[in-house]
Image (cartoon, rainbow, N blue to C red):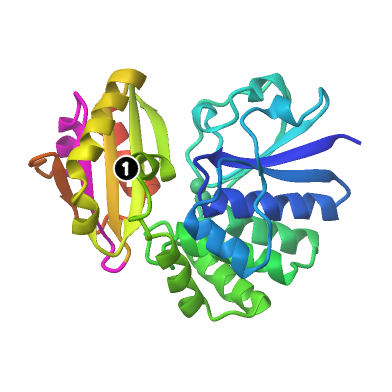
Amino acid sequence: MSKFIVFGHKNPDSDSICSAISYAYLLNQTGHEATAYALGAPSEETAYALNAFQMDAPQVIEKAADVAGADTLLALVDHNEAQQSLDDRADFRIWSIVDHHRIANIETVEPLYYRAEVVGCTSTILYKMYNEQGVDIPKNIAGLMLSAIISDTLLMKSPTCTPEDEAAIIALAAIAGVDYQTYGLELLKAGTNLSSKSCEELLNLDAKSFPMGSASVRIAQVNTVDVNDVLTRKAEFEALMNKACADEGYVLSVLLITNILDSNSTALVCGSEAGKIEDAFGVKVADGLAELAGVVSRKKQVVPPLTKAFEG
Ligand code: MN
Ligand code: MN
C-alpha cells in the first residue's frame, strides 16, 4: 500500500498544521496509510490549539525525500502554489489537494483528486469530507479543525468567512465540548504574544511569496491587539524587509499588522514598487505606512487588488 505524506504550506499557520493532522486522520480511517508533517514549527497560536486538545505537533520536514520513498504519495492541504510547498515536490506524485486558495504555479504529471472550495478554511472543507464519507470526528480532531477555522476567519470576522464556515464552527465546537467564543478569543490572543519574538521571526511567522505579473511580492502578516506596540520596532523591520528585497529579489515587501479587536490593518511597506500599494488600495503610503481600514484577509483583501495593480 502506498503511503501518504500530508502537509500544509511553509511558515505554517494553524490551518496548515491542524488540517494536515485532520486530513491524515481521515485518510487513515478510509483505508489509506497517512502521516501528517509540517513545513515549519507551530506558531504560539497553533501550539495553544495543540495543547488544548492534547495533540502532538507534526514532525517538521524540509524535503519530501527526508521521509518519502519512491512510491510515496503527496497530499497537500491549505496550499497549492509551488513556492509555498515542499521544494522537491516535483519529484513525487501529488495524489490529492484540499485547498481554499487561488490556483497558481501547479502542474501535475498524473491525474489527482483536487478539492477546492471558496470557503474560509481548509478545515471547513475537511469537515464536509468527514460527513460525506461518514467518518466520525473524534473530540480532539474536532478541536483542531475548530481552531483552524477560528484562526483563518478571525473568529468569523474575516470577509472570507462563509455560512459554511460558521456552521462548521458551531458543529465542531459542540463535538469538541468548548464554547467557541470564549475558546476562540483565547486562541487568537495566544497568537498575539509578539514581544518574545525577534523582528526576523515575526516577518517569517506567517509570510508568503506571490508572483504578481513578472514580479515577486512578499506579504507577511501578524495579529495584534496593539498596532503601535508592533511599530516601536519599525526601523528594524524596515531594515530586514529591505534586505530581503535585495537578497530575494522582491520588488515589494509588506508587513500587514492586523488588529484582531477592531479588524483594521496597518501595512508597513518596503521595496521599489511600494507605490503599488497606493494603486491597489487608493491610499497614501506615508513614512512607509498605509492604513488599510477593514482589511484583515491577505488572501481576499490584499492579494487580489495588489495582483491587479501589478498586472494592470
Ligand atoms: Mn494557511
Ligand atoms: Mn487556510
Q: Residue at x 55, y 50 (%)?
A: 42
Q: Amino acid at mark 1?
A: Cys
Residue 84: x %, y % from top left: 51, 33
Q: In this view of the protein, can residue 28 be seen by the observer?
A: yes
Q: Quadrant of residue 88?
A: top right
Relative to residue 157, is residue 62 depicted above or below? above
Q: In this view of the protein, can residue 280 be seen by the observer?
A: no
Q: Residue at x 77, y 29 (%)?
A: 68
Q: Residue at x 60, y 29 (%)?
A: 86
Q: Describe the element under mark 1 as helix, strand or loop.
A: helix
Residue 73: x %, y % from top left: 77, 32
Task: Work out which residue is located at the far right of the displayed protein and give it.
Answer: 1
Residue 308: x %, y % from top left: 28, 33
Mark 1 sits on what residue?
199
Relative to residue 81, is residue 206 depicted above or below? below
Which of 163/87 is in front?
87
Residue 277 lies within the magenta run = yes
Query: In the drawing, does residue 84 fall left or right of residue 130?
Result: left
Q: Which residues are magenta?
A: 261-282
Which of 80/60 is in front?
60
Residue 141 lies within the magenta run = no
Q: Quadrant of the N terminus?
A: top right
Residue 80: x %, y % from top left: 56, 35
Query: In the drawing, does residue 24 fall left or right of residue 196?
Result: right
Q: Quadrant of the C terminus?
A: top left
Q: Quadrant of residue 123?
A: bottom right
Q: Residue at x 67, y 48 (%)?
A: 58
